[in-house]
Image: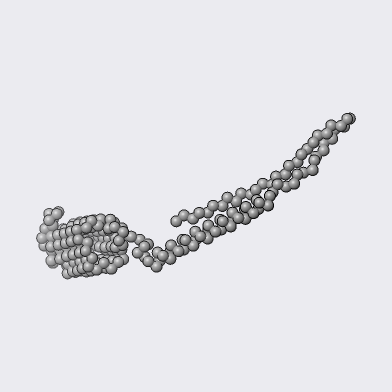
Amino acid sequence: MAALNFCCCSPLPNLTTATTSLSHHQNSHSLTASPPLASCSPPQGTQFRSNLSSICDSFSKVSVLALVSASLVFASNPALAFKGGGPYGAEVTRGQDLTGKDFSGKTLIKQDFKTSILRQANFKGAKLLGASFFDADLTGADLSGADLRGADFSLANVTKVNLSNANLEGALTTGNTSFKGSIITGADFTDVPLRDDQRELLCKVADGTNPVTGNETRETLLCK
């Protein structure tokens, strides 16, 4: 929102004209100045500056009020302050309760699900490359067959999630990310930085081969 501050308040000049006449008298030369004309500073000039100043003040006040009003609207409704990001229309997916929401088969590249509640949400076969699930609750969600390359699961709760045949190459799992009780048959964990306790937990149930990459789940987890 741009504020219009139009103030062209340049001073008006005072006009004073002096007329000088040169009189040539016999046997003498004298320079005689005629009386100066009255000042040409009209009262309209002062009135114009006063009116223009009032207009400038009015524009400034209106602009400030508009900005304050917009701030109050965004503060009262955070959903208007930011969108979810990614191609999922205008719907906000960040910091929302999306329990049981159906995203199956959708293209959600770089979609922002930060801090959202996604319990039992359906992401089966969805394209979620680079999507952010930072600090999100994915308990019981279905991510089977999903493309999760480069997705961010930092601090996320990924317990009891169906990750069968999902591709998690290069996904982030820093912090307290937990995969406890998740199904990982055929999942690809290539280059996923797992904590030792999580790697050990997943290796106990790892089996199968990812149908897209052809990599065995146990090998991608570097299981011993």
Whether residue 157 is visible here, answered yes or no, is no
Q: Is residue 50 above or below residue 22?
A: below
Residue 120 in the image, given as x and y percentages of width and height: 21, 68
Compared across the picture, whether 202 is left or right of 43 comes to: left
Q: Quadrant of residue 216?
A: bottom left
Relative depth, front residue between 130 and 119 = 119
Relative depth, front residue between 10 and 134 = 10
Figure disc tally? 0
Q: Residue at x 64, y 54 (%)?
A: 47
Q: Residue at x 80, y 40 (%)?
A: 34
Quarter containing the C terminus: bottom left
Relative depth, front residue between 77 and 208 = 77
Residue 28 in the image, given as x and y percentages of width and height: 87, 32
Residue 53 in the image, given as x and y percentages of width and height: 59, 55
Residue 190 in the image, given as x and y percentages of width and height: 18, 57
Whether residue 79 is visible here, answered yes or no, is yes
Compared across the picture, whether 24 is left or right of 191 comes to: right
Extreme residue toward the right, this view: 27
Q: Residue at x 67, y 46 (%)?
A: 13
Extreme residue toward the top, this view: 27
